């Protein structure tokens, strides 16, 4: 029995975060229509925000400057993670 979510290396280019670095809002552009959820993690691995898969913007106003990770979990069981830099002016 398989548990968890498979991390896909092939899909790593299937979504983009822009602008990156960002200060207020980051946009998600994805070629994958099957996004189940989006999770934002602090660099220490703690999840700090979870969004519906239909979201295309992440609001960063409450996040301090730092390194974060954005993970897209797909309905097919794959997941893709990218780095996000929050840089306040």
Image (cartoon, rainbow, N blue to C red):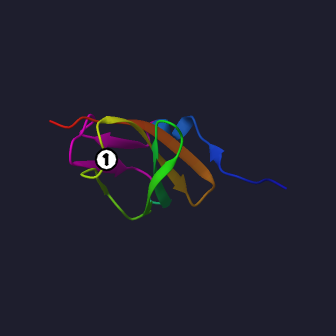
- The answer to if 16 sits in the magenta stretch is yes
Q: Residues within 10 Å of mark 1 (few under 14, many from 20)?
A: some
> Which quadrant would the N terminus be assigned to in this image?
bottom right
Judged from the image, the secondary structure of the residue bearing numbered disc 1 is: loop
Q: Residue at x 29, y 36 (%)?
A: 65
Decide: is 56 above or below 45: below
At 32% from the left and 57% from the top, the residue drawn is 56
Provide residue 42's location: percent of width, then percent of height: 45, 42
Magenta range is: 13-32
Q: Residue at x 39, y 65 (%)?
A: 54
Q: Choose top left, top right, bottom left or bottom right for residue 19.
A: top left
* Residue 15 position in % (x across, y down): 40, 44
Which quadrant of the rendered structure holds the C terminus?
top left
Q: Position of residue 9 (x, y in %)?
A: 57, 34
Which residue appears farthest toward the left when viewing the image? Answer: 89
Residue 88 horizontal side relative to residue 71, left or right = left
Q: x, y (%) of residue 88?
A: 20, 37
Q: Which residue is mark 1?
A: 63
Left or right: 32 in relation to 74: left
Q: How many marks?
A: 1
């Amino acid at each position: 029995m398989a548990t968890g979510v498979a991390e896909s290396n092939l899909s790593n280019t299937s979504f983009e975060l822009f602008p990156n670095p960002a200060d207020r809002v980051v946009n998600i552009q994805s070629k994958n229509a099957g996004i189940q959820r989006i999770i934002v993690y602090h660099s220490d691995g703690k999840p700090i925000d979870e969004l519906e898969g239909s979201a295309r913007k992440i609001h960063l106003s409450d996040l301090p400057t730092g390194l974060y990770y954005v993970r897209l979990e797909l309905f097919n069981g794959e997941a893709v993670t990218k780095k996000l830099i929050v840089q306040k002016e």
